[in-house]
Amino acid sequence: MYKYIAYTFLITIAITLGGKVFSQPSKVIIDCDPGIDDALALCLAMESPKFEIIGITTIFGNTTLGQATKNALNIVELSQMDIPIYRGAAYPMHAPLKPPPTIVHGEDGLGNIHLAKPTLKPKGKPAAQFIVDMVNQYPGEITILAVGPLTNLAQAIKLQPGIAQKVKEVVIMGGAFTVPGNTSPVSEANIDSDPHAADIVCTTPWKMTFIPLDVTMKVKIDISLLAQIREKNEKFGTFIYDISQYYINFYQNIPGIEKGFYAHDPSAVMYMVDPTLFSVEKGPVRIATEGIAAGQTIMATKAHLYKSPWKGKPIASAALKVDSEKLLESFMSIMANNP
Ligand code: BDR
Ligand code: CA
């Protein structure tokens, strides 16, 4: 009898440990416009054992498509990981291309540290086609993390609308639901850069979660955390510290944030690491595509569910609250290589 109990106990422990140690990392495609906080998000996702990054797709936004692609190649080179990079859209679907916000991310998109030309090269396949091919190859397995304008995702849907049901989840850093925007009183930069693409993404029937300014502006990374990352993370620490100086400089005139910055894109990675850090509201989301409110993300809650143009549209989730203390704790443990 005792022998039997001991045996069952040992088996249970083995299964539990096995589950922890050998649980499969989930497949992720990161669509980004690096960008200082995009760079930090990429390093974070690369450091987390929870993800297998099967590809990075690039997009205009914080800088030009060419520079964003070069920056992504530089980051993959630094990581010494084998991650393919695919070039995406160089301009929005219909809206005019806005000049890159060099005041926020620098002339090179990475705080003017001017990295050398990478030896790696992007793949020849366009980003949207890569997304379609991967989703078809791994139905139900792929999460797409989009932390730039949504043009590549919209193009993928236009290429093959049927992929929507095969995507595991789309996690989007974008939008401003209950707070003012950062490019206009109502619009957030990623959505505002291509509102038509964003509206296509919102009206696609896939599981999608927004990580908007409502939560990302509650997560602040300051110089002391950056100093710890520099000290503890051999691979990325100095790079992250160096690129962040320009970003900190931009943020220094924003009240409530001293010697630090808002962790927009890293917050979306942290949602994928641990969704319980956030609480979400659900409802159909539409984007204002024209006029002075262009780029506004509008979710219909109960009273307006059946009103056009939200009627019958897919239900999205938007994170509106975050436990920022716990998030930063978990973020730091990943960046200090101690998840
Ligand atoms: C978003 O816009 C860009 O500046 C950041 O990289 C982030 O993705 C925040 O509005
Ligand atoms: Ca970004």
Image: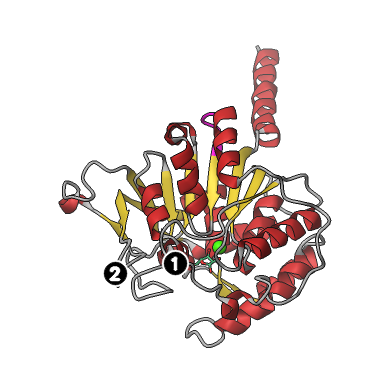
Q: Which residues are magenta?
A: 138-142
SS for dot 2: loop
Residue assigned mark 1: 96
| Vertical comparison of 162 with 97: above or below | above
| Vertical comparison of 162 with 245: above or below | above
| Vertical comparison of 270 with 10: above or below | below
Q: Amino acid at mark 2?
A: Gly
Q: What number is the disc on residue 137? A: none
Residue 259 as seen in the image, left or right of residue 84: left
Residue neighbourhood size for the residue with mark 2, other residues' Cα within 10 Å, grouped as few (<14), some (14–19), many (≥20): few
Tell me the residue at 47%/59% (across/down).
92
Q: Position of residue 8 (x, y in %)?
A: 65, 19
Q: Which of disc 1 and disc 2 is earlier in sequence?
A: 1
Residue assigned mark 2: 291
Ligand 2: give its quadrant.
bottom right
**Image quarter for residue 44?**
bottom right
